[in-house]
Image (spheres, helix red, strand yellow):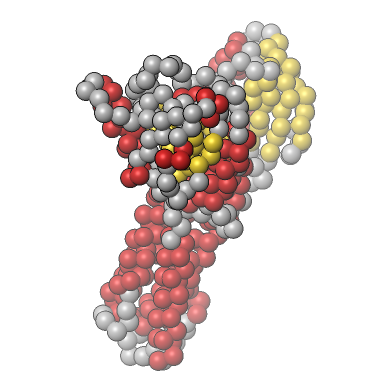
Amino acid sequence: MSTIFALITSPFRAGISVIRISGDETLQCLKNLGFKGALQHQKISFQKIFDPKTAEKIDEVLVSFFKAPQSFTGEDVAEISIHASPFILKKILEILSTQKNCRLAEAGEFSKRAFLNGKLDLVQAEAIPDLIAAETELQHRQALMQLEGKLGKIYENWRLRLIEISAFIAAAIDFPDEDLPENIITSVEENVQNLRNEIKKHLDDKKSGQKIKDGLSLAIIGAPNVGKSSLINFLAQSEVAIVSEIPGTTRDVVEVHLSIAGMPVKISDTAGLRETSDPIEKEGIARALQKARLADIKIFMFDAVNPVLREDLIDENTLLVVNKIDLGGSKLSMINHQLSAIELSLTDRINTSTLLEKLEEKVLELAPKQNSPLITQERYRTALQNSVENLEHFSLTKNIELAAEDLRLATNEIGKIIGKVDIENILDIVFSRFCIGK
């Protein structure tokens, strides 16, 4: 297998860049760069890099060496910290590319080798980009649990239990003259039912893991010129939307991503809701209504002087916000609604802290409760649903070969999640638990 190398830090200007090398030729690659002396496992050493053709010094660097199998990939690995000069980086990569059996790594290839060498299961490998991309505390916590193997261990436990059950079925098929005791049949049926219920409970999560990754959605809706754009600018602490006294200024959806109470939230400022003949504004209003119907949280804004509500867009996850209370002439008495409204002035910053508190409370109310690892990939959900479907078909009262096939398919679906699909495991248990040769 080729030795691979790549830049593992940002390609943009920085103080330091890091190049990783992994494979059997790692030490030879380092020698070609001019490294001197023996590199010690899990130690950092100071080295100088020289051009092998001209003997000209290129850089002074720090190198970390990890001897196989005690490395990220399970191979010999070196990580070279260089000064982040584009010239230095280009020169070192050119030298490495001339090394025999050494090439630039493909996307994700270091993690792929870690999986192939048994350092990570697929679930752990998929946690790496999630951990890197984490912007909130919840995202970080979920990715870290997955990287630590907590989610993969759940799936591996289910897979091993299915394999163990399959061993009994395989024995019954191979030795039809030796009937399995009734208590064994009952035990197998109960074990399958218990396992099926565990998986179904795991699936019944309201897609919480996906919500942590993608975040909650919040739509700011209301009539034109009630302060929706001012509100998104206030929440974002940035001028992300145009604010104008001219009604209908916002025609398309303006979005901003924020962290609220440790939860990622995508906030959408939408077009003002009103009757109009303008085709462009009509499309903007249609998009606003779509966002409102799909949003996890809605902020329905209206002003104190002209309070207009759309009852069909208000539910238990709607915050009613009355803006412009600084103008006087309030007609709030005209509003009769079971949800209490938050009265504020964005211009004078009156009661804005109350809005932030209520918004944080609503986010915490809807945020997933993270007591255990959650399903973070749609492929996990699909595989688990397929596994449950096969276990629903399982029955020892029907054809035993069909029952064995149901178990095999259910096991393979879970094996797909962690990257372990091997029916030979069933035979291993059969031979270890039963006296096949007697």
Q: Where is residue 177 in the image (x, y as percent from the top left)?
A: 33, 90
**Residue at horizontal 46%, vertical 40%?**
333
Residue 228 coordinates in the image, percent (x, y) = 45, 28
User: Horizontal placement of 165 versus 401: left or right?
Assistant: right
**Vertically, is 310 above or below 242?**
below
In terms of image quadrants, where is residue 238? top right
Q: Indicate the quadrant where residue 282 lies.
A: top left
- Asked whether, in this view, residue 54 is left or right of residue 301, the answer is right
Residue at the image point whose x is 29% and y is 76% from the top: 401
Residue appearing at x 52%, y 19% in the figure: 239
258 or 426, which lies in front?
258
Viewer-side residue, 184 vs 432: 184
Q: From what the image shows, is residue 324 above or below residue 206?
A: above
Where is residue 429 drawn, in percent x and y?
48, 73
Answer left or right for 286 relative to 341. Answer: left
Q: Where is residue 200 in the image (x, y as percent from the top left)?
A: 42, 65
Residue 47 visible in rendering: yes
Query: Can I make out residue 298 in this image?
Result: no
What residue lies at 50% left-to-right and 42% top-to-bottom? 341
Which of the image's four quarters has the C terminus? bottom left
| Image quadrant assignment for residue 187 | bottom left
196 and 270: which is toward the camera: 270
For residue 323, side relative to residue 413 (left or right): right
Residue 361 in the image: above or below residue 389: above
Tally of numbered discs: 0
